[in-house]
Image (spheres, coloured by chain):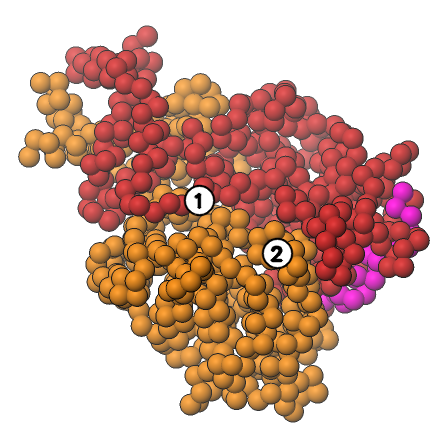
Chain colours: A orange, B red
Amino acid sequence: MIYYQVSIFSFVLLLVTDITSLIYAADQKSVDIHLEPPYQADRSSIRPSISHAQKKPKPKFAQKMHLISSCNGSYVKTNGTTCGLKEIMIGRCYEYQYMKYQLFLTNQSNVKNCTQLYQAFESAVRYKPYCNMNMSTYEKYFQLALSGVHVINRAMFWSGTYGVTHAYSADGANYITLEDTLAAAMANGLVWCGNENHTDGFDFFSCPNNCKDNRWADLAFWGLASKTFAQLAAGEIYVVLNGSHANDRPAFRNNSYFSDFELPNFRRTGEYRVTKINILLLHSPDKNVTEKCGEKSLVQLENLILAQGFQYACKDDPEELILIMCGNQWKARECQIARHVLRQAWDKKLYGTSLSKRNSHSFLLVCLTALAEIFFLVKF
Amino acid sequence: MIYYQVSIFSFVLLLVTDITSLIYAADQKSVDIHLEPPYQADRSSIRPSISHAQKKPKPKFAQKMHLISSCNGSYVKTNGTTCGLKEIMIGRCYEYQYMKYQLFLTNQSNVKNCTQLYQAFESAVRYKPYCNMNMSTYEKYFQLALSGVHVINRAMFWSGTYGVTHAYSADGANYITLEDTLAAAMANGLVWCGNENHTDGFDFFSCPNNCKDNRWADLAFWGLASKTFAQLAAGEIYVVLNGSHANDRPAFRNNSYFSDFELPNFRRTGEYRVTKINILLLHSPDKNVTEKCGEKSLVQLENLILAQGFQYACKDDPEELILIMCGNQWKARECQIARHVLRQAWDKKLYGTSLSKRNSHSFLLVCLTALAEIFFLVKF
């Protein structure tokens, strides 16, 4: 009887109110302080795309293209080699080894010589015509940088989820991504290309976007980086995929770095073999769900993984990652109610009541909406 | 009448259930994937403390102390100068100018010479006895690094809120903190001290923690950095303070960097004067509220600000920052319900119903608890 009354009461309230009022209510500011919207941290990729027309690796802060070409302070907008390439790479190498990841990835007899490492990189590219590269161009560099490293139960791969994955992996504190390894960290976001005719041996004015008939020119570095990282991964590994791509683009697709360089290179035998592959499938706020675990390309991926003898698990939107997504997209529809609920929780913390005046009306609506749904599900 | 019934019904439910069941319910994982807890990004400070016994600046990744002393690959745990200090600072300078902040802080005729900048730093400290420093030791360095820079309406200061503030400022994309300026970014997290007797001119084995009778030895760099940054701030500025310090330590206190170096140095006149100071007062999840806006040290701060002719505003826990705090502390009591609500929102997105079976019971409890509170507030 009482159930029935609650149900009717809720339904009537639903009819006479508009859920959008809730969203506007959440936008109100109680104090006259204007804050910037959160920064959209999710960038699609720093690696060149493979399946679409071959592109150069994008700088990590691509929207702020460096405008200096000749690196002497005169400004001409270019897409050439990053000014200070050498200094940046060597500095990152020291910082990585002596500050950040000392205890993560290297053991005590495994300190790399940063100058030697940069020279291995430079000798692969400087004074070399860009389009002559191949898969083994950077082999010595990766061997030097990653020898003796194993990433056990903490390797995290990503495809179409760069920003969220890196926010969650937290610079290697939670998980270790490709970009948290020394070899990739030194080059992440940089642009470079050799030029046999330039006095510097690098082209600071323009790096070609693709080399006709040689896909390896663009893949050489990040392809080998991905392959090498996959070979270092051991135990359980994690793969963060995007299940809300536009235009029905699948979460797992052939010609992706993951399918071409990572999946085929996981170790299947030995002490450092991969045992289980955990897929974390994300669906972005304000985007449609294209695929869920157990659907479409995820079925294809599961079959590939099982055929290679690994265990497989897939989870849609782990809560830890939902909060990160909402943290980057405050205004998204799916995040509004949580934002509201957090305001409630902090009001209770601050004022000793869970329902401040300005919020109680809309929170009530959320609850009654939910209640109405439950009871209608039960009744009909 | 129906109000009354809902009220009684809710109250009975409250009596027979335990809110902790909700928290445990939220912890359940539907799929067998174990994920790491989010990384605790909030570190208390990278600057040396002033009011407590003088301490050295801590490396940003202090928990992973660098173990290499002589920087040749042999391992002796030290608290001396960071290995690769020079390379790290020069590399960061290039990265800052040519990759990250090109369009933020410098105008097109304002590219700094990174080697010259490092030399200004080095000449202040190399071969110099550490305890002889004073407030003007690094003056030339800061002049070189920050000349021509103004931070208008986007300067963000922090005290006791390093991690949250930096997550929110987003590397300068939302707001600009001291650590987002070139001068501070080059040195952030590094340890250094000169040694007149060492061949390198730096002491790589041990940097003193304090110098008797000379508080400037420890304050020289970060004190001047804070002062200089305050002088660059214009328009509306933001200050993120911690209202949930342990042991009744106030949010605003004398002898803090903010009170000693920042507040006295905001410009009061001219084109680049500060007009308004916005205080964002945070209360961490799972911590008690020590002070709110309009209480205790915030009153003292308001008076100081108004006396200097600036406008003042204070806001407790802006929602943008609550989500960041909860993103770092998933398991905190105040964050559980939001986590739950987000799960609901994503279940609806994925499965077309806002209430998956496993969550409906506990969500119902939240709502009924809230309803009961409302009606009890109304009735009594």
Q: Which residue is mark 2?
A: A107
Question: Considering the image in quadrants, where does the C terminus of chain B appear?
Answer: top left
Subunit of label 1: B
Which residue does the numbered mark 1 point to in the structure image? B36
Please tell me whether residue B128 belongs to the stretch shown in magenta. yes
Q: Which mark is residue B46?
A: none
What percent of the width, then of the height, locates residue B138? 84, 51
Can you give x and y, in whole percent of width and height, for residue B34 in the image?
37, 45
Q: Is residue A325 left or right of residue A87?
A: left
* The residue stretch that appears in magenta: B110-131
Q: Residue at x 36, y 37 (%)?
A: B339
SS under mark 1: loop
Let me know if residue A372 appears in the view. Answer: yes
Which residue appears farthest toward the front when viewing the image? Answer: A270
The main secondary structure of the magenta stretch is helix
Number of labels in the image equals 2
- Measured in 3D between alpha carbons, the distance from the residue under mark 1 to the one under mark 2, in whole angstroms, is 23 Å
Above or below: residue A241 compared with residue B17: below
Q: How would you rate the neighbour count of disc 2 (Cα within 10 Å): few for under 14, some for 14-19, many for 20 or more?
A: few
Horizontal placement of A251 versus A377: left or right?
right
Residue type at tag 1: Glu
Rendering coords of residue A111 (x, y %): 66, 61
**Which of these two is toward me, B373 or B12?**
B12
Q: Residue at x 45, y 28 (%)?
A: A346
Considering depth in this image, is B135 or A293 the residue closer to the camera? A293
- Quarter of the rendering occupied by the N terminus of chain B: top left
